[in-house]
Amino acid sequence: MAHLVATKTLPNGKAILLAQNDLTIDHLEFSGASVPSPDLNGAGIRYEGGNLKVTNSYFHDNQMNIMGGVVAGGTVVIDHTEFGYTTPSATILSHSLYIGHIASLTVTNSYFHDTSNGHHIKSRADYTDIENNRIVDGNGTSSYSIDMPNGGKGVVLNNVIEQGPHQSNPAIIHFGGESAPYAGSSLLVKGNTILNDYSGSGTAVLNHATTVTAEISGNKLWHVPTLFSGPGHDGGGNSVLSSEPAIDTSHPWTTTTPTPTPTPTVTELYGTSGADTLSGAGGDIAMYGGYGNDTYIVDSAGDKVTEYSGQGVDTVKSSLSFTLGSYTEKLVLTGSNAINGSGLGGKNTIVGNDAANVLTGGKGADVLTGGGGADTFRYLSPGDGLAIGTNVTKGTKVADTITDFKPDTDKVLLDDYNFKMAAGSAVEGVTLVHLTTAYNGTNATGATQFTKGLPALVIDSTNTLYYDANGKGDGYTVLATFQPGINVHASDIVIA
């Protein structure tokens, strides 16, 4: 891969590369970044705007490897990338990956190691997703392996995390502590292998967000005396290893693709003021529709769709799994592969193909059509529905509409932690209550689940699915309305 080396103090006082607009980095190496005191935070990349995606790259021997500030609505995606050997400082924490307040940070399949007196990953994002990584102190002197100091929605899933013998903080994962947690904060720590090579104490999860209960389950622990400190729930499946497994220290990136001739440049397509069809066929294409009701054809993971506010109702037709971006309203999955489609939070229309799709509308009143195949309609939290106040019937308030649900074939999938229900299939008459009238928050209280004040689901005479957190009528959530003429049963709902 090409290697960008800073051989002297950075003249811009920030980084080797400034990311101020949408940017994708692939197969690049960054090292040597430094700036003088008092900042001491020279970075390989300084993230300042747009959306940043980094894949198959290597950051090492910088004061900080990637550093980002506040970017409203911004997203950062890191995949198959290595971060190592931050330059030690006596006065500044040398974080390997530091991200300020943005919409989301996603880190997958990457390798962090040998960080000096800072955190491997520090994220102030609203949503932080850390999955399938190796986060290893090694001979470094790092503090937290993962730090989410302002809370947010945190997912730490299926990682290998090693606290080394020279660490500067006995806690491994830290949540909250620098401010009141963001609204809607939650923390899931699941399926990780957590190793402690420090001779003293060790705490897997340190939760300083007193209003948030961390869910901790299915982790494998070696020499970790304390599972959690602060509000936490042992969700089961946590186990103690009899010996410490070997740690994979190989580079995470994929093989560099040979450079074709001529050397490619970023290809961009721009629409007109009318209704355009822009196709990403033939490569990784950045498409900008502009005004009009535009259609985008996506067939490569590198294709990018950009729209702006008030410029029409736009459609993406994708043969790959795809998540709609801002101001893009409709997603149609094409081809015959089992792929997935997701909305971003507005009023989206998502249509599956004839294979088995997972459709996630997210926030907003979405219209979801599975198409053929055994489809799954996924709800990550009650926030994906529409909250209703005390003793109010749904009336004209609409959440999602599912147009073609197939009982005994399709499924509704609810996150067990965020919906506060036990994993497994719903139970007819208990977890799922059928009403012959319109639900108003209180008229199912005779059901077993409600008499106990427990969370439950309701389907009423309008064929609408509701979630009630306690069955007391002091507020509930409309999730989705199914098409008329079908009977949805408990076996059609999966809680996992």
Image (spheres, rainbow, N blue to C red):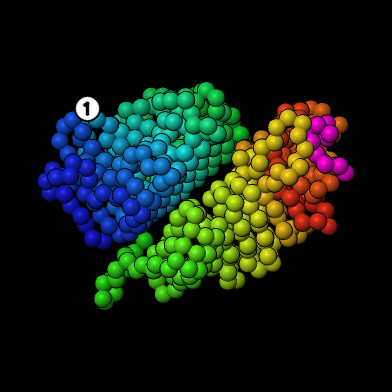
Q: Say if the magenta span includes residue 439.
A: yes
The spot of residue 194 in percent (x, y) is 46, 37
Q: Report the side of 467 relative to 255 (left or right).
A: right
The residue closer to the viewer here, 339 or 100, is 100
Relative to residue 14, is residue 480 drawn left or right?
A: right
Inspect this view and state whether residue 108 appears: yes
Q: Which residues are magenta?
A: 436-445
Q: Position of residue 181 (x, y in %)?
A: 48, 29
Provide residue 315's location: percent of width, then percent of height: 54, 63
Which residue is disc 1 drawn over?
Answer: 91
Vertical position of residue 219 compared to residue 374: above or below: above
Query: Relative to residue 181, is residue 78 depicted above or below?
Result: below
Q: Residue at x 34, y 31 (%)?
A: 143
| Residue at x-position 65% and y-position 55% | 367
The residue drawn where x is 16% and y is 49% is 6
Which quarter of the picture shows residue 354? bottom right
Quarter occupied by residue 147 = top left
Front-lying residue, 351 or 124? 351
Whether residue 161 is visible here, answered yes or no, is no
Is residue 110 found inside the magenta-colored segment of the image? no
